[in-house]
Structure formats: C-alpha cells, structure tokens
C-alpha cells in the first residue's frame, strides 16, 4: 500500500481525487488536509466530509484544517467555475468534526512518523506544503515525494493566459516548494489535462449508465464545472486532480515524462503563477519530473470502475 495524504481545496475533481484515495485498495490514505483555494474554506471542509460519506468511510480518515489564505496575497476563489464544488449536495454534518491539529502540523508529523515513505498528493494551492517546509527543516527529507497538480508546460493557463489556478493563487508557496529539494512529480494543466483528462460525452454517458451512488455523486459534483468548461469550449469536465492521485497509485498510466527545472513567477504583471519549465539547455539542474502523456483510455476506465465499485488491485 502507498502511504498518502491528500492536500486539497475540495471541489469537483478534488472530490474525485479523494474517491481515488479512499476507494483504491492500493492507497493507505492517512489524512485529508484542506487548504484555501477553489471555494469558501468551510464549504471545502463540508465537501471533504460529503466525499468521505459517499465513499462509505466517514470517521475512518481524519480531516485537518490548513491555511485559510495564501502566504502573501488575499485568497482568490474559483467559485465561478465550481459553484459550491459539489452541485448543492448537503447532508447532516453531525459528527463530522475536523481534527483539532492544524493541517501543517499533521503534514509535519505524518512525514516524520515514516521518513521517506509518505507521498503528499497536492491538488490545491501549495500554501500548506510551503508552510510545513518553513516550519520544520526536516520536512523535505521526511517526505517521500510530492505529486503536484499545477502549472502548464506550454504556458497555456486556465486563470490567466500564463497561469494555472493552483500556482496563480499562491505563487510564493509554489516557488518555495519547487526550490526546497522535494522529490516532485508534476501533473500540469496544459497540454496534459486538456488532452487526456477531460471526461467527454462518451465517458459521462458511461458513468451515468452505472447509476450507482458513487456515479451519481460524481455527476452531481461535476455539474457546475461541466457547464463552465463547455462555456469555454472544452467538451467535458476536467480532472487533473484525480489524474494526479491515479498516476501515483498506477504509474503505468504514465506513457511519457521528462525531468525539468521548474520555477514559478511571483512578480510578473501578466505572468504571476506562470510555471517556467526549463528542459535542460539553460544550465539549471532538474528539480521535478513532469508528466507529459498518459493513457487516457486507461485513466477513464479506471475512474469509471471506481465509480462502479469494481476496482481491483
Ligand atoms: C486546479 O484548480 C482547480 O480548479 C482544480 O481542482 C485543479 O486542482 C486546476 O487548475
Ligand atoms: Ca484542486
């Protein structure tokens, strides 16, 4: 089993990524840590509990609350994209108590408990990870690896022309994390997500036809983003976060990856959050593996099987 923490700004594809961590028998999901990002912080926490409930694992995996805003800048949300992140689903939250320990302390503690073994799946802004890095000098060495959803390796952004949302929201955190010396795997927004992690009409019809509680949860959680994605010319719902979790548990999904030196722009007027990915001709040592291609059909099939409740190791 792979020891994992998922650090999330829980909405839509974050929920699907949590389902991957909660339902795939290869994952030993030790905690869910929440970070400011997509939608209101308290809503993100509710969304984490809704997802735990959908997976039938309420009370089994602890939820810890992390940083409520980026390190330097005010929080900017993506509520125009995600709505509340779960398509208006609600439930009785009695007994859904986050743990008292701050998420940054949880990350530091869990990494120290099994040095070199824990992978953190980072699918929101990198505020919690950067703060843990600053707080505990041993954190970088104690963490086995980071699987980071963020950036684009062709400069095509989704929040500005140059920037992807997670790096844009807290560019100082992203810069800190890439400079720290972690073993990092990056799952970029473009071109990878746009080409390989969009559930289009065919995949969505297949998921609808499952008609399981999990498939209904997925369809509802993705509804707002599907509408938004269609309005900007994407023919389906984008799932970079679940791809990030999936390639950790099933690296055979990756068909091409390359080493890059990744740095994140914090100053540019038009390029805040831009991920500069240098491929070796600029005299910079690589600090990350960037996933460049995956087997999309296998990925869609994997998620669909999860939602059907049929994942086998
Ligand atoms: C990232 O931002 C969020 O909207 C998604 O959950 C994903 O983590 C994509 O830019
Ligand atoms: Ca996310």
Image (cartoon, rainbow, N blue to C red):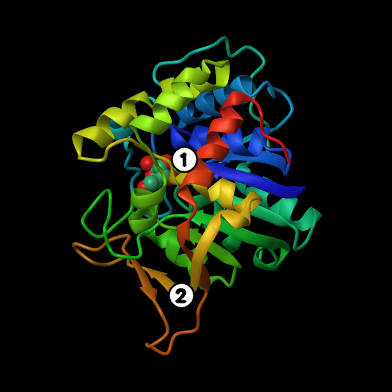
Q: Which residue is mark 1?
A: 68
Q: In the rendered view, tell whether residue 54 sits above or below residue 288.
A: above
Specify few, some or many for label 2: CA neighbours under 10 Å numbering under 14, 14-19, or 20 or more.
many
| Side of 79 where 45 appears, left or right | right
Q: Is residue 308 left or right of residue 286?
A: right
The image quadrant of residue 199 is top left
Callout 1 secondary element: loop
Looking at the picture, tell me which residue is in the foreground, 42 or 202.
202
* Location of the C terminus (image quadrant): top right
Which quadrant of the figure has residue 88?
Answer: top left
Q: In the rendering, at what x and y percent does residue 74 appear?
A: 33, 46
Q: Are marks 1 and 2 in contact (CB under 8 Å)?
A: no
Q: Which residue is mark 2?
A: 260
Query: Who is closer to the viewer here, 277 or 212?
Result: 212
Task: Indicate which disc residue 135 carries.
Answer: none
| Sequence-first disc among 1 and 2 | 1
Q: Name the residue rendered at 69%, 24% in the picture.
A: 57
Indicate the secondary structure of the residue bearing disc 2: strand
Give above or below for 61 relative to 296. above
Viewer can see residue 165: no
Q: Cα distance, mark 1 to mark 2?
A: 31 Å
Residue 21 visible in the shown view: yes
Residue at (43%, 23%) from the top-left corner?
Answer: 219
- The residue located at (33%, 38%) in the rendering is 77
Q: Residue furthest top?
A: 92
Residue displayed at 42% across by 32% down? 203
The reply, left or right, for residue 172 in relation to residue 99 is: left
Q: Position of residue 169 (x, y in %)?
A: 35, 50
């Amino acid at each position: 089993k792979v020891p994992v923490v998922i650090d999330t700004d829980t909405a839509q594809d974050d929920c699907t990524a949590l389902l991957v961590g909660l339902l795939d028998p290869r994952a030993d999901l030790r905690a869910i840590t929440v970070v400011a990002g997509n939608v209101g912080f308290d809503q993100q926490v509710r969304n984490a509990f809704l997802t735990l409930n959908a997976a039938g694992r309420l009370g089994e995996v602890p939820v810890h609350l992390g940083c409520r805003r980026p390190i330097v800048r005010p929080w900017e949300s993506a509520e125009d994209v995600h709505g509340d992140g779960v398509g208006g689903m609600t439930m009785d939250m009695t007994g859904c108590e986050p743990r008292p320990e701050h998420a940054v302390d949880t990350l530091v503690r869990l990494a120290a408990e099994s040095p070199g073994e824990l992978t953190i799946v980072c699918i929101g802004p990198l505020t919690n990870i950067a703060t843990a890095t600053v707080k505990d000098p041993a954190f970088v060495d104690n963490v086995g690896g980071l699987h980071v959803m963020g950036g684009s390796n062709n400069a095509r952004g989704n929040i500005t022309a140059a920037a992807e949302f997670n790096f844009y929201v807290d560019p100082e955190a992203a810069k800190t994390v890439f400079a720290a010396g972690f073993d990092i795997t990056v799952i970029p927004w473009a071109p990878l997500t746009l080409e390989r992690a969009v559930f289009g009409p065919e995949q969505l019809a297949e998921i609808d036809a499952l008609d399981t509680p999990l498939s209904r949860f997925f369809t509802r959680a993705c509804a707002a983003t599907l509408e938004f994605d269609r309005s900007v010319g994407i023919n389906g719902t984008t799932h970079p976060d679940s791809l990030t979790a999936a390639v950790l548990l099933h690296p055979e999904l990756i068909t091409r990856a390359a080493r890059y030196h990744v740095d994140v722009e914090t100053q540019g007027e038009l390029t805040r959050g831009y991920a500069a990915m240098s491929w070796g001709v600029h005299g910079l040592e690589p600090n990350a593996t960037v996933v460049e291609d995956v087997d999309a059909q296998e990925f869609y099939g994997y998620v669909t099987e999860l939602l059907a409740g049929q994942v086998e190791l």
